[in-house]
C-alpha cells in the first residue's frame, strides 16, 4: 500500500505540473472569453488539481465486489447513525422522506411563484441544518442582501417576528439578551453567505471549493436560478439554465453534499383552476426534472383567495427519486415558518371545500327554481 501511494503521488505531481504549464496559454488565449472568464478558468484548473489530491477514489468501471462492500459500509453507517443524511426540518416533509431521507450528492429544487415564501423556506432549512449538523452551509443570494438573509435566519432561530427587531426598545434587556444569544450561536456555526449580484456557476463552484477546504460542506443554497448568469454566450435561456442545473448536480456529487436550488415558476400556472405547482412549471427550463433528485413546490391558497380561513403554506413533494411524495404543511403568520399537523391541516382544507360546495349547490338550486318560474 505504501508503494502504491508513492506511485500515486508521483502521478499527481506530473499531472499538476502539466496543468500548471497550460495555465499561461489558457489565460493568454482570447478565444477563452474576457479576462475575468479566463482567470476563472485558471482558478478551476487549480481547484481541479487540489481536488485530485483530496479525492483519490478510482473512476471508471469498478468491480462488483468493491461496490458490494461499499454498499454494506453505507448501510452500516446509516443504521448506526454515522451517515449524515439531509432532512428539511419540516415534520410533514421529513415524514414523507422516510426512511432514506436525502443523501449527499443530491440536487433538491424548490419552485414557487412570488409571495409563496421561497427564501423563508430556505432559511428555515439552513437554520435546521446548521444547528443539527457539524458541516458547513453556503448560501448564495442573488436577490437579497446578506444581512437580510441573516435577519431571517435569526428570526427563525429565535422564533420571533423580525419586525420586533425594529420596534422593541433596547431597554427590554431580557428580549435583547435572548436575541444576542441566538445571534452568537448562529455566528459560531459553519455558515457563509455570498450576496454578489449576477453570479455564475463558475463563481459558485470556486467559492464552495474554497469553503470545502476549510470545513466539509453539507448544504449549498442558491436563491435563485433565473437570476444567475451563464458562463458563456447562450442564445436561449433554457439551454443556459439547463447547463447550470447540470453543473450544480455535478457539484453536489463531487462534494457529497446537498444543493438546494430555488427557482421561480411560470406565470402560466395562475391561469389554472388548481394553481398548485408542478416541475413542468419551472421557468425557461425543462432540464430541472431530469437533473433534480427531489422537487418541492410551495403553494399558499391565501395569496389567491384572501377569504380562506387558514393560511397554510403547502410544501408539495412532486418528485422524489428515493422515497414518497405528498404534502407537508407550515404557517408563516409569525414571520417565520412553523410546522402544522398534517391531519389537522387537511381537515381544515376539506371542511372549507365542503362549505364552498354547499354554497355552490344552494346557489344552483335557487337559480333552477327561478328559471322554472
Image (cartoon, rainbow, N blue to C red):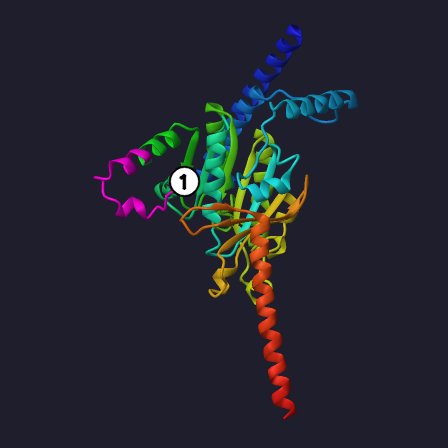
Residue most toward the bottom?
373
Of 296 and 232, which appears nearest the observer? 296
- Whether residue 141 sits left or right of residue 51 in the image: it is left
Residue 165 forms part of the magenta stretch: yes
Residue 82 forms part of the magenta stretch: no
Residue most toward the top?
2
Q: How many marks?
A: 1
Quarter of the image with the N terminus is top right
Q: Which residues are magenta?
A: 155-178
Rendered location of residue 290, percent (x, y): 66, 46
Position of residue 77 relative to residue 294, above or below, is above
The quarter of the picture where residue 370 lies is bottom right
Of 277 and 224, which appears nearest the observer? 277
Residue occupying image coordinates x 28% and y 35%: 174
Rendered location of residue 20, percent (x, y): 52, 23
Rendered location of residue 269, percent (x, y): 57, 62
Residue most toward the left?
171
Rendered location of residue 281, percent (x, y): 59, 57
The quarter of the picture where residue 256 lies is top right
Q: Can residue 17 be seen? A: yes
Residue occupying image coordinates x 50% and y 39%: 125
Of 36 and 346, which appears nearest the observer? 346
Residue most toward the right?
64
Position of residue 5 relative to residue 200, above or below, is above
- The residue under label 1 is 153
Of 77 and 41, which appears nearest the observer? 77
Position of residue 49 relative to residue 318, above or below, is above
Q: Secondary structure at mark 1?
A: helix
Residue occupying image coordinates x 61% and y 24%: 81
Quarter of the image with the C terminus is bottom right
Amino acid at each position: 500500500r505504501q508503494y502504491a501511494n508513492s506511485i500515486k503521488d508521483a502521478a499527481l505531481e506530473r499531472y499538476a505540473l502539466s496543468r500548471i504549464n497550460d495555465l499561461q496559454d489558457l489565460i493568454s488565449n482570447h478565444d477563452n472569453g474576457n479576462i475575468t472568464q479566463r482567470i476563472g478558468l485558471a482558478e478551476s484548473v487549480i481547484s481541479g488539481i487540489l481536488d485530485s489530491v483530496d479525492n483519490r477514489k478510482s473512476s471508471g468501471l469498478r468491480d462488483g465486489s468493491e461496490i458490494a462492500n461499499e454498499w454494506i459500509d453505507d448501510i452500516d453507517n446509516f443504521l448506526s447513525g454515522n451517515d449524515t443524511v439531509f432532512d428539511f426540518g419540516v415534520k410533514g416533509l421529513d415524514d414523507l422522506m422516510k426512511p432514506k431521507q436525502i443523501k449527499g450528492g443530491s440536487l433538491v429544487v424548490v419552485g414557487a411563484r412570488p409571495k409563496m415564501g421561497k427564501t423563508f423556506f430556505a432559511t428555515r432549512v439552513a437554520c435546521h441544518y446548521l444547528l443539527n449538523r457539524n458541516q458547513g452551509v453556503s448560501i448564495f443570494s442573488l436577490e437579497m442582501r446578506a444581512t437580510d438573509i441573516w435577519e431571517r435566519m435569526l428570526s427563525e432561530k429565535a422564533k420571533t417576528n423580525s419586525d420586533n427587531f425594529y420596534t422593541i426598545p433596547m431597554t427590554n434587556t431580557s428580549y435583547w439578551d435572548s436575541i444576542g444569544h441566538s445571534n452568537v450561536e448562529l455566528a459560531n456555526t459553519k455558515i457563509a453567505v455570498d450576496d454578489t449580484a449576477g453570479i455564475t456557476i463558475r463563481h459558485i463552484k470556486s467559492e464552495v471549493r474554497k469553503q470545502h477546504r476549510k470545513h466539509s460542506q453539507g448544504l449549498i443554497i442558491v436563491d435563485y436560478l433565473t437570476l444567475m448568469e451563464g458562463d458563456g454566450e447562450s442564445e436561449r435561456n433554457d439551454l443556459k439554465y439547463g447547463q447550470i442545473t447540470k453543473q450544480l448536480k455535478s457539484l453536489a456529487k463531487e462534494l457529497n453534499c446537498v444543493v438546494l436550488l430555488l427557482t421561480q415558476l411560470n406565470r402560466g400556472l395562475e391561469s389554472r383552476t388548481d394553481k398548485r405547482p408542478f416541475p413542468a412549471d419551472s421557468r425557461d427550463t425543462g432540464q430541472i426534472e431530469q437533473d433534480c433528485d427531489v422537487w418541492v413546490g410551495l403553494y399558499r391558497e391565501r395569496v389567491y383567495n384572501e377569504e380562506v380561513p387558514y393560511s397554510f403554506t403547502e410544501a408539495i413533494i412532486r418528485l422524489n427519486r428515493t422515497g414518497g411524495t405528498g404534502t407537508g404543511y407550515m404557517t408563516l403568520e409569525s414571520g417565520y415558518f412553523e410546522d402544522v399537523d398534517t391531519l389537522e391541516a387537511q381537515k381544515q382544507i376539506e371542511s372549507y371545500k365542503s362549505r364552498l360546495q354547499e354554497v355552490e349547490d344552494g346557489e344552483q338550486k335557487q337559480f333552477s327554481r327561478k328559471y322554472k318560474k
